[in-house]
Image: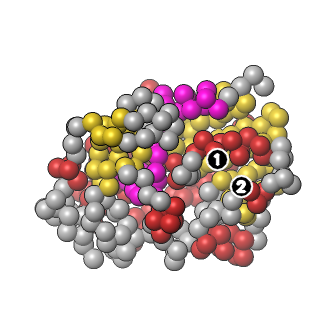
Amino acid sequence: MRLNRHRQTPHALVSEKVIEFECRFCSNTHAKRIVSTFDHHSNLELPIDLVECSNCGIISIFPLPNEKTHEAAYPTDIVNPLLYSQNQRRKFVETLYRFFHPYSVRWRMKRVQKEIGVGRLLDVGCRNGDFLQVMRQQLWEVAGIERNPTQFEFATQTLGLEVYRSFSDLMPKYEGHFDVITYWHSLGHFSNPLKALDESLRLLRKNGLILIALPNLSSLDFLIYKSHWAALDAPRRLFHFSPQPMRNILRKKGLALVRKKVIPFDIYYNCLLSEKILIDSSACHNQTKIWRYFRAGMIGIIAHILSASGAGSGMLYVVKRDGK
Ligand SMILES: [Zn+2]
């Protein structure tokens, strides 16, 4: 089904006025609305606003949903969370995704192995467990956390992985146990990311590392796609952390940045899916799909070149306890 959203574009809903809210990170009560988007994976046409805290710079959905509403926004019938869509016309993107996704998983594997050759890994928000499976094949001892019941069942029953539903399920057995804890774009999905980091630190061994992958709104592709940028993923992703606010959070949590890397696959993935969102929203009915996907490739290449400056569509932060 083609979603008929061109009569009321999200851009038209953006307001520059300062609004009242309470930041979950610094308790500041002022923020500015920066973009208005939609749930691109549902029938709901209600605009979803993203606001930026005027103090700490963290971007959040406003108003934040309660836990029940937030959970209900995740599909429960599809194992691959990156391609869920009510729109069945997705074969081209799906084919590309199936081709490139294994390379993306291998990139993650190599990043972890460059930090620590082999050890004990916890992947927070492990989805269907594909990354954990690859790491297990590399002789890592692996575990995951996943709340989505469909993903959880696939990871545990089909892949036979050790996956838990929450941090508390790993306590106290795994306190100080893991060499590496990974968040592949999952931190912004927690209603309390600071608490998630606290729990991670309890599970991390003394000199262990946390790898946090995050989408970056300070990127060229967000500036181009704005409300149609795929990585917004509203209303599932509640928070966005640009590099400077992220550094502040790390400092607040007593974490030191070891290194920061651009994730190359995210650039092309976000451009491609953003063009698909534009096609599905019928905002581009005068242009062909082929042109749209060609444009995605061109923007991706330019964004990739510009990412040499250190800011890309997706960023990976490798962190450890400060002073260790
Ligand atoms: Zn704040």
Q: Quadrant of residue 299?
A: top left
Which residue does the numbered mark 2 point to in the structure image? 167
The quadrant the C terminus occupies is: top right
* Residue type at tag 1: Ala
Q: 318 or 9: nearer the eye?
A: 9
- Residue appearing at x 32%, y 50% in the figure: 49
Q: Position of residue 89 (x, y in %)?
A: 33, 74
Residue 324 lies in the magenta-colored region? no
Q: Position of residue 104 (x, y in %)?
A: 56, 52
Helix, strand or loop at disc 2? Answer: helix
Give left or right: position of 130 versus 94: right
Q: Position of residue 166 (x, y in %)?
A: 69, 59
Residue 235 lies in the magenta-colored region? yes
- Residue appearing at x 35%, y 62% in the figure: 39
- Residue appearing at x 68%, y 28% in the figure: 254
Residue 308 shows in the view: no
Give left or right: position of 137 versus 11: right
* Residue type at tag 2: Phe
Report the magenta residues as a range: 229-253
Q: Position of residue 51 (x, y in %)?
A: 35, 42
Residue 103 shows in the view: yes
Q: 63 or 124: nearer the eye?
A: 63
Checking the image for residue 16, the label placed there is: none
- Residue appearing at x 40%, y 64% in the figure: 93
Which residue does the numbered mark 1 point to in the structure image? 196
Give left or right: position of 292 versus 323: left
Give left or right: position of 227 versus 80: left
Helix, strand or loop at disc 1? Answer: helix
Residue extending furthest toward the right:
173
Q: Quadrant of residue 127?
A: bottom right
